[in-house]
Image (tube, helix red, strand yellow):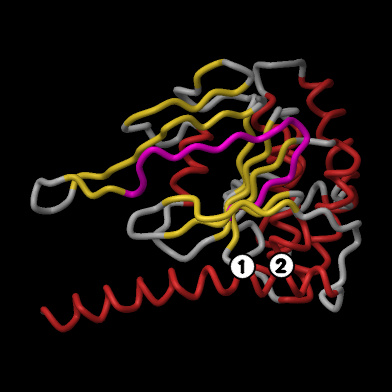
């Protein structure tokens, strides 16, 4: 399997000195070129899991491997796009895309790579602009271009469109689909939106919370572009929603119990 998550556990140290488990014995296998969405309520560990695949978070127990090689630190074979673009405000658009290429190729080659990826995300005419001169959606496109410029084997996206308005999200959904069809990168995409997950992905992996775990794995075998009015889309959305309602209610009840206690 291309990306393998095997019996992975993660816990953080709590205030009382005891470990707080995020999830334990998590297993997930992802094929090459797949677009997989991780969906679930807050606290289920989906963003933590993504950070562990990126090598930004340590693994408490278990193993994550890419093409058989254990992931222990960040590397260029994995590109990350965060909810906030995390691009450098003091660099121009093109300089941001070129930044991770420093030391890996000549400046002329890096310039060509940056130009190619800025064209891919339709930002060529803004390459000399600075981030503050761009809209939120354009900044996210810069972040996507920068991640793709490294030619990673896996593109990791942590709610990249969560802070954007609905119209901008719709536009970027279309752009991301075109990029994925062109590059066929393996994408692991974290989202809170059931509609977004079904619209974009080949698979929707649903995570539950308390404890974090995988509760369902849906193959989305529906031709793209997908319409919300499609009966198959509606059916999958309802099935996922029924699963998540139980998990969300569990979170609310625990929060109410905590507030009552204090």
Q: Depth check: 71 or 233 in front? A: 233
Q: Which of 113/206 is in front? A: 206
Task: Work out which quarter of the rendered image holds the C terminus and state it.
Answer: bottom left
On the rendered image, what quadrant is the N terminus found in? Answer: top right
168 relative to 123 in the view: left or right? left
* Label 2, residues with CA under 10 Å away: few <14, some 14-19, many ≥20: some
Residue shown at the point (39%, 38%) measured from the top left: 25
- Above or below for 170 versus 124: below
Q: Are marks 2 and 1 in contact (CB under 8 Å)?
A: yes
Q: Is residue 53 magenta?
A: no
Identify which residue is drawn at 41% across, 34% down.
8
- Does 251 sit left or right of 42 as displayed? left
In the image, residue 89 lies at what x, y percent?
Answer: 60, 51
Picture quadrant of residue 187: top right
Label 2: which secondary element? helix
Residue 151 visible within the image: yes
Question: What residue do we see at 36% from left, 37% from top?
Answer: 9
Crowding around mark 1 (Cα neighbors within 10 Å: few <14, some 14 to 19, many 20+) is many
Measured as percent of width and height from the top left, residue 151 is found at 75, 28
Whether residue 23 is in magenta: the answer is yes
User: Which residue is the site of mark 1?
Assistant: 240
Q: Secondary structure at mark 1?
A: helix
Q: Which mark is residue 236?
A: 2
Q: Which residues are magenta?
A: 22-38
Q: Residue at x 45, y 22 (%)?
A: 72
Give the x, y percent position of residue 11. 28, 43
How many angstroms separate mark 2 from mark 1 (CA)?
6 Å
The answer, for residue 89, to whether it is visible in the render is: no
- Check residue 118 in the rendering and tell me which mark sits there, or answer none: none
Look at the magenta stretch and give its main secondary structure. strand
| Residue 71 vertical placement versus 83 (above, below) | above
236 relative position to 226: left or right:
left
């Amino acid at each position: 399997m291309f990306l393998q998550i095997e019996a992975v556990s993660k816990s953080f140290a709590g205030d009382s000195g005891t470990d707080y488990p995020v999830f334990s014995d998590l297993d997930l296998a992802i094929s090459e070129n797949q677009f997989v969405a991780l969906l679930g309520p807050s606290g289920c560990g989906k963003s933590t899991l993504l950070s562990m695949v990126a090598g930004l978070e340590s693994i408490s127990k278990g193993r994550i491997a890419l093409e058989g090689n254990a992931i222990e630190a960040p590397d260029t074979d994995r590109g990350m796009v965060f909810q906030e673009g995390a691009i450098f405000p003091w660099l121009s658009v093109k300089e941001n895309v070129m930044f991770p290429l420093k030391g890996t190729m000549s400046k002329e080659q890096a310039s060509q790579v940056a130009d190619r990826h800025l064209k891919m995300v339709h930002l060529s005419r803004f390459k000399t602009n600075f981030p503050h001169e761009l809209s939120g959606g354009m900044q996210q496109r810069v972040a996507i271009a920068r991640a793709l410029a490294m030619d990673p084997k896996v593109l990791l996206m942590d709610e990249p469109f969560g802070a954007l308005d609905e119209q901008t999200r719709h536009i970027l959904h279309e752009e991301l689909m075109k990029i994925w069809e062109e590059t066929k990168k393996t994408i692991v995409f974290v989202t809170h939106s059931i509609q977004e997950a079904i619209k974009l992905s080949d698979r929707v992996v649903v995570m539950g919370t308390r404890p974090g775990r995988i509760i369902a794995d849906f193959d989305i075998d529906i031709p793209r572009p997908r319409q919300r009015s499609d009966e198959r889309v509606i059916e999958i959305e309802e099935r996922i929603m029924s699963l998540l309602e139980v998990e969300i209610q569990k979170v609310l009840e625990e929060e109410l119990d905590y507030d009552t206690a204090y």
